[in-house]
Amino acid sequence: MVKFDITVNPECKNCWGIFLDTLKKSFPEFAMYDGDFYFSDPEDRYDEESDSYLPPITEQDVQDWLDSFTCEKAEEEAYSSGDMFVDIVVKNTDPTITENLDIDKIWVNKKTGDLFTCIDNTPDKNIWVGTKSGKLIRPIPPADKFDFYGDGSSVAFYKLSGDTRDSGGLYNGVDTRIAWEPYFDEYVADSRLNGTIKIKGLPFDDTTPKVTVSCWFKWNGKNGVMPFGWDQYDIYITSGKLGFNTFRGDIYGIDFKKYNKKWVYLTVTFVNGDYGSIFVNGVRQELSQQLSSIQSSQAKMSPNFTIFGHNLSSGYRRAGQIGRLRIFSKGLSDVEVGELTMSEVDLIRSVGGEV
């Protein structure tokens, strides 16, 4: 091994993982130890493909290459190689790193999910994001991002994998008699013990125009149940029908019998003073008045939200199983629902689920 005393373009510090990967491709003899650059046998460069010896590399060869390397070139290299790298931003996962951490340029390989490491911009530092050893870490799956749309509309996110904590840290739920059912590598909330989850203090009231709730839902076939809802505005299932209910014996929705005992990704937008929209597995449903008629004065949001049942009653709880429930402070477009649904489906498939 021969150490080369060369200077790295400071701009490479912003795309360190791709830089090192490309350097290795350009100079297969390259190795790095404790921040120093080494090349194994630079004078002996046998090329199997041509069955000949290539000209020996020198420090100047490497230095010229380094001087020409920029983040723009790194991006071009990544795309041209078909690896489909994209910019992402992640939080520092090593609590011992506190100063000058640059997270503006972190790169993820969309094929493999591998995250390229990024180092501190401070001169003479060699600090890795993730682990100091430089071990590649997995990025946060899109479906697990709290602010899914990046617009601040995510109010709460309950993974319901063994507890009722809100990933946003503001609106933790309180559960009563919830059974936690294993589901692949996580859990889901099961209401079979007449369980319920109460959430209080949400930033909604009777003037809130729209709120969207999305979750994985597996109906158990029971009628007279409410998967979730507010005080007197909820999603109700009876006679095999699922839809909006305003405590007038009404259901505005769909026939749900074909989804009995099947996992579906359910997205519901509640609208102030009216019925809203329902998507099943990302597909907008054609809704109709299944039972009775709306009581508009009851179609209101509130600071109180209930998973399994509703806030003003101890009944209607045994609806089945729910996982990964989100609450958004807006209505979602068809495109947004599709994006969210596919991210959830991809996540479930990644752990062996069939949806």
Image: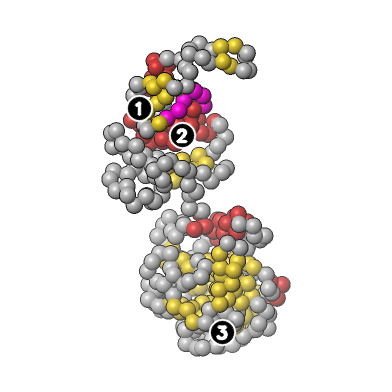
Is 172 colored magenta in this rendering?
no
Location of residue 310 in the rendering, given as x and y in whole percent from the top left corner = 50, 83
Instruction: Say whether residue 204 is left or right of residue 226.
Output: left
Cα separation between marks 2 and 1: 14 Å
Is 27 colored magenta in this rendering?
yes
Task: Say what amino acid the circle numbered 3 marks.
Answer: Asn
Q: Element under label 2?
A: helix
Q: Element under label 1?
A: loop
- Asked whether 225 or 236 is in front, the reply is 225
- Residue at left 59%, top 87%? 249
Numbered tag placed on residue 194 in the rendering = 3
Numbered tag placed on residue 18 in the rendering = 2
Mark 1 neighbour class, 10 Å CA radius: few under 14, some 14 to 19, many 20 or more: some
Q: Element under label 3?
A: loop
- Residue at left 44%, top 78%? 174
Q: Earlier in the sequence, mark 2 or mark 1?
A: 1
Task: Say what amino acid the circle numbered 1 marks.
Answer: Asn
Q: Which residue is mark 1?
A: 9
Magenta span of residues? 25-32
- Asked whether 128 or 167 is in front, the reply is 128
Cα separation between marks 2 and 3: 53 Å
- Asked whether 242 or 119 is in front, the reply is 119
Instruction: Say whether residue 247 is left or right of residue 259.
Output: left
Instruction: Say whether residue 22 is left or right of residue 348.
Output: left
Q: Is residue 78 above or below residue 339?
A: above
